Amino acid sequence: MKTHVRRLTRAVRKRRDAVMRDVPASTDRLIDSVTEGSASRRAVLKGAKAALTGKNPVWAAVKGLISGLSTRTKILLALLVVLVALLAPVLLVVALLVLLVAWLVAAVRAATR
């Protein structure tokens, strides 16, 4: 019985040592995939990290996504945000005018019946 326990202990130690030798290589591969990975991969990993630390995972994922974008894409995204900010009041006025015209048409139709 003693010999079986010793063999088992030796086997467990050998396996543990083999796993511990592989850990640095695995972490290096993980770090490389995060730093060189796509924007979506960064977003997922940042969101998961934030969720595990108790922070807002959505905001962290958005920041991770933006950090993974190329410079050209970031510039285009900034231009899109500025364009939406400039056109939003115009679109609101157009929508209100459409509602006003629809209300007038409905009022005229109701009055002529």
Image: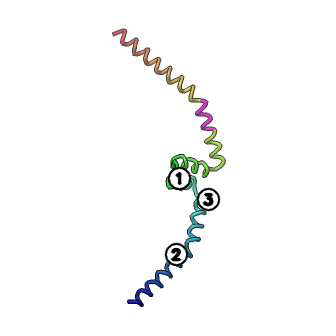
Earlier in the chain: of badge 2 and badge 3, it is 2
Describe the element under mark 3 as helix, strand or loop.
Answer: helix
Label 1 or label 3, whichever lies nearer to me, is: 1
Label 1 residue SS: helix
Residue type beneath disc 1: Ala
Q: Nearer the viewer, residue 109 or 19?
A: 19
* Magenta residue span: 79-86
- Residue placed most toward the observer, 103 or 10: 10
Structural distance between the alpha carbons of marks 1 and 3: 17 Å
- Which amino acid type is marked by label 3? Thr
Q: Quadrant of residue 86?
A: top right
Q: Nearer the viewer, residue 16 or 3?
A: 3
Tell me what residue is drawn at x 36 percent, y 12 percent: 110
Q: Picture coordinates of residue 48 (x, y %)?
A: 51, 55
Residue identified by numbered label 2: 19
Query: Image point 38% across, 13% down: which residue?
Result: 109
Q: Residue under circle 3? A: 35
Residue 50 has which mark? 1
Alpha-carbon neighbours of circle 2 within 10 Å: few (<14), some, or many (≥20)?
few
Prevailing secondary structure of the magenta residues: helix
**Crowding near the residue tagged with mark 1, few <14, some 14–19, many ≥20 C-alpha atoms within 10 Å:** some
* Label 2 vs 1, first from the N-terminus: 2
Looking at the rendered structure, the secondary structure element under dot 2 is helix
Mark 2 or 3, which is nearer the eye? Answer: 2
Query: Looking at the rendering, in which quadrant would you find the N terminus?
Result: bottom left
Q: Circles 2 and 1: CB distance less than 8 Å?
A: no
Find the distance from the CA under tag 2 to the CA under tag 1. 28 Å
**Mark 2 residue type:** Val
